[in-house]
Amino acid sequence: KVTKAVLTTLILIFSLLSCSRQKEKSTKKVYIKESNGKYSLYRNGQPYIIKGAAGSSHFNTLKNIGGNTIRIWDTVGLSTILDSARLNKLAVIVGLPIANSDYMALYNDSTKVTKQHNAFKAIVNRFKDHPAVLMWCIGNELDFPYKPSYNAFYQAFNKLTDMIRKEDPNHPITTTVLNFNKKYISNIKFRCNIDIISFNIFNRINYLRDDIKSATLLWRGPYMIAEWGIDGPWDGTLQTAWGAYVENTSNKKAEFYLNRYKKYMPLEDSRFLGCFIFYWGNKQEGTHTWFSIFDENGTSSEAVDV
């Protein structure tokens, strides 16, 4: 027969355990909370809505216009990037640039796989406690094929996610898919262990809402748009008689960004965590100005004002 004193003690123990679990979750640096189908990202105990840019420069400008997050693709100069982001009150999605699944020479060689794994393990352990880290992104626009011949890739991928969860349980894991590929999403769902799916999507963003709805059986979790912006020169762009792409003016690009965001960004979706404009910096792709939101001297284009 349980005495009143014993019962009181048991209740107290269970209450303390419950409080301990809640405190552990609330003190995790970054986590995702689901409530009635709505997903929210939390950072340092507070809801965190991503207002992001893909690039590794002009942090102060991003902060001043209301941005809070950057997304980078690799770990080159990571220490400097994280320190600069912290000074500007920005968080960082750190890219771990693993080889694509079709790189059989790597994934069928256990020595090379181990070398890749250990290199990223060292990165995670070195930077996991940096206050600017928001999450880890494994690869960029990877292919996730079904064929059994790719099993070695999936084993290496999952070994990486397992390592990150063990070494750094305080930050979520994502990966990026080019456009919206249902086969890849299905394989990620059933063969991988990530927290968020991220899409790099440009001209296909017009169809994103319908695509998301059509794939709810495959992925019901949260998602982000890791790259979005103007169409690439390869997307049916007009060409001159000598084969040069006809590029829009800064004014036209700014209008395009604004209209695309207002019409097609799924801000109302309860699973949408945020997006990253591309490219926050200057790069050669198509032309030296096609995607660049800044010029070589750091001067901003009209897109920054928009």
Image (cartoon, grey):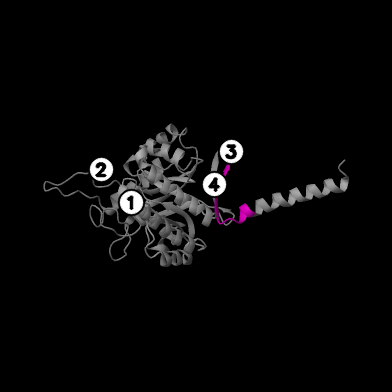
Which callout, 3 or 1, points at the residue further toward the start of the chain? 3
Disc 1 target residue: 106
Which callout, 1 or 2, points at the residue further toward the start of the chain? 1
Disc 3 target residue: 36
Which callout, 2 or 4, points at the residue further toward the start of the chain? 4
> What stretch of residues is rendered in magenta?
24-36
At label 4, counting other C-alpha atoms closer than 10 Å, the crowd grade (few under 14, some 14-19, many 20 or more) is: many
Q: In whole angstroms, how far apart are the C-alphas of marks 1 and 4?
A: 37 Å
Tell me the SS state at disc 3.
loop
Q: In whole angstroms, how far apart are the C-alphas of marks 3 and 2?
A: 39 Å
Disc 2 target residue: 235
Which callout, 3 or 2, points at the residue further toward the start of the chain? 3
- Closer to us: mark 1 or mark 4? 1
- Callout 3 amino acid: Asn
Q: Position of residue 79 (x, y in %)?
A: 43, 66
From the viewer's side, name the closer residue of 242 and 99.
Answer: 99
Q: In whole angstroms, how far apart are the C-alphas of marks 2 and 4?
A: 34 Å
Disc 4 target residue: 40
Q: Can residue 286 be spotted in the picture?
A: yes
At label 3, counting other C-alpha atoms closer than 10 Å, the crowd grade (few under 14, some 14-19, many 20 or more) is: few
- Closer to us: mark 3 or mark 1? 1
Q: Residue furthest left?
A: 242
Q: Quadrant of residue 285?
A: bottom left
Tell me the SS state at disc 2.
loop
The answer to whether 71 is drawn above or below residue 192 in the figure is below
